[in-house]
Amino acid sequence: MSKKDDCIFCKIANHEIESDYLYEDDLVCAFRDLNPQAPVHVLVVPKDHYDNIVDDVPGEVLAAMTHAVSEVARICGIKDSGFRVIANTGAAAGQTVMHLHMHVLGGSTLSEGLIPNA
């Protein structure tokens, strides 16, 4: 498993730092964002470290992330009411934690300008 010792999301994904986990499998985990931008704001992260979505991420990891998004939406009761999935890529796009992650946002009508940093 590829981890970075100084990466907060590596530590959370591998339970070195505990969080409010909603879903987990062998490749990814999902946990509530500490600074939510919507009533439901969950982060889906791979357990291995990838800087962003274009960092040669294996297909099985991306598939696991997509499955986790679906499970989070089901668990949080937003699967049928609509939700947004965002993967910021690079600092100019608002990515502040350089570990691939997807934001799952929902639970209310989302404004067009809502793009979370992280």
Image (cartoon, helix red, strand yellow):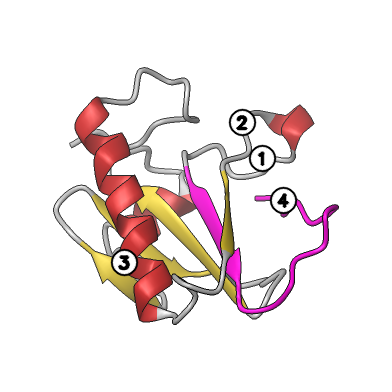
Labels 1 & 4 near each other (Cβ < 8 A)? yes
Q: Earlier in the sequence, mark 1 or mark 4?
A: 1
Q: Under tag 1, what secondary structure?
A: loop
Q: Nearer the viewer, mark 3 or mark 4?
A: 3
Q: CA distance from mark 2 to mark 1?
A: 6 Å
Quick one: SS at disc 2?
A: loop
Q: Amino acid at mark 1?
A: Gln
Could you tell whether 8 is left or right of 5 in the image? right
Q: Residue 106 location in percent, x, y?
A: 61, 70
Look at label 4 and name its amino acid: Asn
The range drawn in magenta is 101-118
> Against 84, is 6 above or below?
above
Q: Which residue is mark 3?
A: 71
Residue 95: mark: 1
Among numbered discs 3 and 4, the one appearing first in the sequence: 3
Q: Are marks 1 and 3 in contact (CB under 8 Å)?
A: no
Q: Are marks 3 and 4 in contact (CB under 8 Å)?
A: no
Q: Disc 3 marks which amino acid?
A: Glu
Q: CA distance from mark 2 to mark 4?
A: 10 Å
Q: Nearer the observer, disc 1 or disc 3?
A: 3
Residue drawn at point x = 44 percent, y = 52 percent: 9
Nearest to N terminus: mark 2 or mark 4: 2
Q: Which residue is mark 2?
A: 89
At 28% from the left and 53% from the top, the residue drawn is 67
Q: Residue furthest front?
A: 80
| Left or right, residue 21 beside residue 85 | left
